[in-house]
Amino acid sequence: MSQQPRIAIDAMGGDEGVRVMIAGAALARHRHEGLRFSLFGDEAQIKAALDNHPNLRAASEVVHAPDLVTGTDKPSQAIRKKTSSMALAIQAVKEGRAGAAVSAGNTGALMAMAKLALRTMPGIDRPALSALLPTLGDNDVVMLDLGANTECDARNLVQFAVMGAAYARTVLDLERPRVRLLNIGTEEMKGTDEIRDAAALLRAATALPMQFDGFIEGDRISTGDTDVVVTEGFAGNIALKTAEGTARFVTDVLRNAFTSSLRSKIGFLISKPAMHLLKHHLDPNNHNGAVFLGLNGVVVKSHGGASVKGVANAVHVAARLLEEDITRRIAEDLANIGALAETQAKADAARTAQSTEQPAK
């Protein structure tokens, strides 16, 4: 792209509010010097925060938003707040005044607003929430859906796979991402009808820029054996929250163990470099920035409790998706899936017609 995109920031979202959101945007601009920003929220608070970041101030416009979406607002309530910082940021994307929106606010409200304003792409029935999770391999793993859709059919899962693979090619620089469906076993007969039907469709989609490797169980998500894990939002959200809880559990157990005695404290000093590496690997701020894939526009959800570094990573994700034109990539892959489905339908119809024309013996 000849000109860096403009990012719309919901400056009022998140646990820490304006200070962290503005500092995170400023840090992101050091990584993407050409980025421009539209900052939505309380004008006085934003301008006060910008005093500490003159480099960001020079590349930003401030748009006052008189209303605020709270963490307790239901989606139906949030949608009615037309002049909230979240709503105005999404509206900027809809009207083409910004390429992407970033918010750390209420997830349900953000999903509802984004879907209502931007609509889903042609060929996509439902948007999916996707994020990067750490693994033991060379790359993170893309996982979706993480909670936007609690029930999905085979068609939805195939669409999620297409979007997840396009996302992995963009953010992980993979030519043919390895894609698997989350299941209760790896055998072909395991799982629901929807999962098995989706697997059959993906196995037939050999022309897509992905490698479908069948099923994966929950305990293999973090091994690095796959690049994209696809599931419906109910199981996906449980898997994500379980992984986050396990990471905190491991960290707390180690902390308690290393402070239990003098010998343990000495052991901690010896193993401090390894512990620092573990902490870095498990820090959610290093993987912050979930994406609503399948919309006619880029919307990135930052964790509500994200640090300055975490917000910067979320902005980086938004910038990268715009630079690589993720919407176009998904559209191209969906066209291939559509052509495959049409060919398959014609072949099935021909076989059915042939069988009915054969005389009975």
Image (cartoon, rainbow, N blue to C red):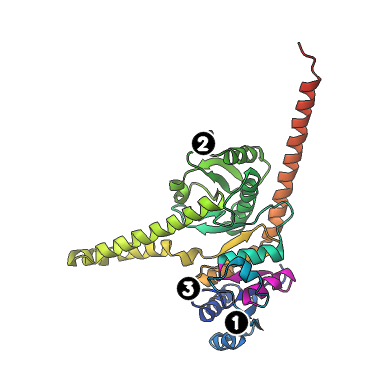
Question: Residue 42's quadrant in the figure?
Answer: bottom right
Instruction: Give the labeled residue for mark 2.
Output: 190
Mark 1 and mark 2 lie on one chain; the one further toward the N terminus is 1
Q: Quick check: marks 2 and 3 in contact, CB under 8 Å?
A: no
Q: Secondary structure at mark 3?
A: loop
Badge 1: few (under 14), some or many (20 or more) residues near its Cα, within 10 Å? many
- Stretch of the chain drawn in magenta: 84-106
Mark 1 and mark 3 lie on one chain; the one further toward the N terminus is 1
The residue located at (51%, 65%) in the rendering is: 288
- Circle 2 or circle 3, nearest the eye: 2
In the figure, 333 relative to 1: above or below? above
Question: Residue 12's quadrant in the figure?
Answer: bottom right
The disc label shown at residue 56, or none: 1
Instruction: Give the labeled residue for mark 3.
Output: 307
The residue located at (58%, 67%) in the rendering is: 74
In the image, residue 259 lies at what x, y percent? 24, 67
Q: Is residue 266 shown to the viewer in this render?
A: yes
Badge 3: few (under 14), some or many (20 or more) residues near its Cα, within 10 Å? many
In the image, residue 79 lies at what x, y percent? 65, 69
Q: Which image quadrant: the C terminus?
A: top right
The amino acid type of the residue labelled 3 equals: Ser
> Marks 1/2: CA distance?
52 Å
| Residue sitting nearer the eye, 200 or 184 | 184
Q: Which image quadrant: the N terminus?
A: bottom right
The residue located at (42%, 61%) in the rendering is: 281
In the figure, 359 relative to 33: above or below? above
In the image, residue 220 lies at what x, y percent? 45, 46
The amino acid type of the residue labelled 1 equals: Leu
